[in-house]
Image (spheres, rainbow, N blue to C red):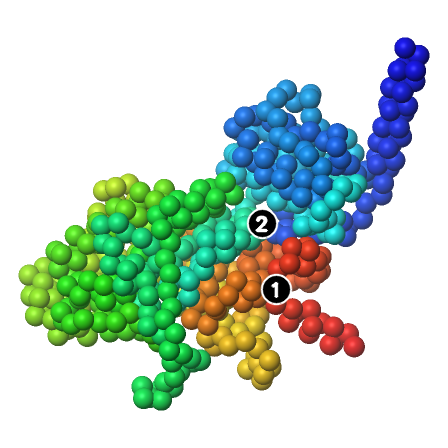
Amino acid sequence: MIKKITIVLLILITGFSCSNKNKNIVNAEEDYQIIPKPTSLEFTNGRFLVDSNTKIVGNSSLENEGNYLADMLNAATGENISFNPADANQGNIHLKIDDSIENEEGYTLDVSFDKIVITGKTPQGVFYGIQSLRQLIPVPTEGSTGAINLLIPAVSIKDSPRYVYRGMHLDVGRHFFPVEVIKEYIDLIAMHKMNTFHWHLTEDQGWRIEIKKYPKLTEIGAYRKETLVGHGATAKLDREYDGKPYGGFYTQDEVKEIVAYAAQRHVTVIPEIELPGHSLAAIAAYPELGNTGEQYEVGTRWGVFPEIYAPTDKTFEFLEDVLTEVMELFPSKYIHIGGDEAPKKQWEESKFAQQLIKREGLKDEHELQSYFIRRIEKFLNSKGRDIIGWDEILEGGLAPNATVMSWRGIEGGIEAAKQHHKVIMTPGTHCYFDHYQVPEEDRANEILAIGGYLSVEKVYSYEPTPEELTEEEQKYILGAQGNVWTEYIKTSDHLEYMVLPRLTALSEVVWSSKNNRNWEDFNGRLKHLVKRYDALGLNYAKHIFQEENAIEE
């Protein structure tokens, strides 16, 4: 009996000694390099030790977040930490819901030497608190294996996002990416507290989603016979092709798997089904959807094609059938319907289209496109969904409940906001991550890109809310999005290279308040975050760091 008491006392004394030691650790500002920058951050002395005694507790409604945090800590320590929905007194990491937090995505994170408390208005807020906690974990532990002592610096954070829409886009029509790559992309989005994945699923060069009622969309439309090499020549006869068949698509089961995976990380997946243009792959599969009746091939080059859906009842029946299956797979409020780069030549030459313009009292082919979009919107609205379209949907008159995605500069966004339509800003000048990351004179060793020049610093300089808008009109700016078009992006490594760290910069643009952003401060924190990217094996672009090293030398 005396021996047992002695052992217990030794354990208590040792634990008390370790706690006291951790309690008195002096922390420094460099221990708190969080991106995006929190609204409020106060640090104190002391560090929390994550070890085999660590227990995560919280309400059963936070099981998803609790298990996510447990997996994260286990990967960092080699321990077997678990989440237990139980009384708060049983654990030392507490996940909580607090209705008094104003912002739906807001959270607080409090770390002391003996306890961590993450509180959110919603489970999503708790998840973002976990992401901030993740960036407090010492960098060498990311992706490592084996038991270690993990010390997290004491801090008190109160945080919430500036914009409700914080998105990243990915085009899988030009080049197809496997399910695991899509999941990794979603992980990057979530890690940066972004909340939307815009999945561009159909294109002239490939239809990428299984539609059971129309099997030829994937049997024919998902594959092209070859692909243009390089940028291609202006003259058709001078273009070079690789001669290799290319394609792929996602089954409906795979789509469900990805949507569920994203939901666990509080990322909403918005599908894009392009119409009325960028529809060559669908028309190649079903020629009756076109205006000429000709048999076409799936696109093998880049650029804009003249093929466009015929505005017939058969086409609308097809699109409603497709969108019905899409809505069964995607619970998102929004469905993106494209609407960009839709040449009108075939409609100008179509007897049916011209008769429709006359019958409906339309002014021209631009108003015919508006008619087309409005008809699709009416159908989606009847199913409880809203549409998003590229800013060309403003031409000919905007559909009543449409949200505009402004890509050709900011003018479309300004016009839509002034009409009191919701707007997502994604101008090519600041948000197109398929552009080069260095100026033209420095591209000798750069992998091929579509063109342009967009540096990390320029992304960071972007202000999504145009100053031309009144205070009332500014409320219609939902946020911003980074776009990744994949004409020249073929692999996951190349994708990471084009996205990081430009995504990192955009994440702070859409999360942190305008007054809380400073390039020099961000750049300093970025140097810490990329160490985490290194530990995760991410292939980020290093131009900004090389430039600074050259200046210092």
303, above or below 45, in the image: below
Say which amino acid is labelled 2.
Answer: Met
Provide residue 320's location: percent of width, then percent of height.
21, 50
Q: Residue at x 25, y 41 (%)?
A: 383
**Residue 424 position by quadrant:** bottom left
Q: Residue at x 42, y 62 (%)?
A: 176
Provide residue 443's location: percent of width, then percent of height.
57, 81
Q: Does 80 sit left or right of 122 as displayed?
A: right
Q: Residue at x 33, y 66 (%)?
A: 223
Residue contact between numbered discs 1 and 2, judged by CB atoms under 8 Å = no
The answer to whether one can see residue 317 in this image is yes
Q: Residue at x 50, y 40 (%)?
A: 264
Q: Does 419 sit left or right of 57 as displayed?
A: left
Crowdedness near tag 1: few (<14), some (14–19) or many (≥20) residues, C-alpha within 10 Å: some
Looking at the rendered structure, the secondary structure element under dot 1 is loop
- Which quadrant is the C terminus positioned in? bottom right
Q: CA distance from mark 1 to mark 2?
A: 15 Å
Please give the residue where the numbered disc 2 appears in the rendered image: 191
Say which amino acid is labelled 1.
Answer: Tyr
Q: Does 445 sit left or right of 550 as displayed?
A: left
Provide residue 10's location: percent of width, then percent of height.
90, 23
Residue lying farthest top?
Answer: 1
Looking at the rendered structure, the secondary structure element under dot 2 is helix
Please give the residue where the numbered disc 1 appears in the rendered image: 540
Provide residue 232's location: percent of width, then percent of height.
40, 82
First in sequence: mark 1 vs mark 2:
2
**Residue 274 position by quadrant:** bottom left
- In this view of the protein, which residue sits in the foreground, 330 or 29? 330
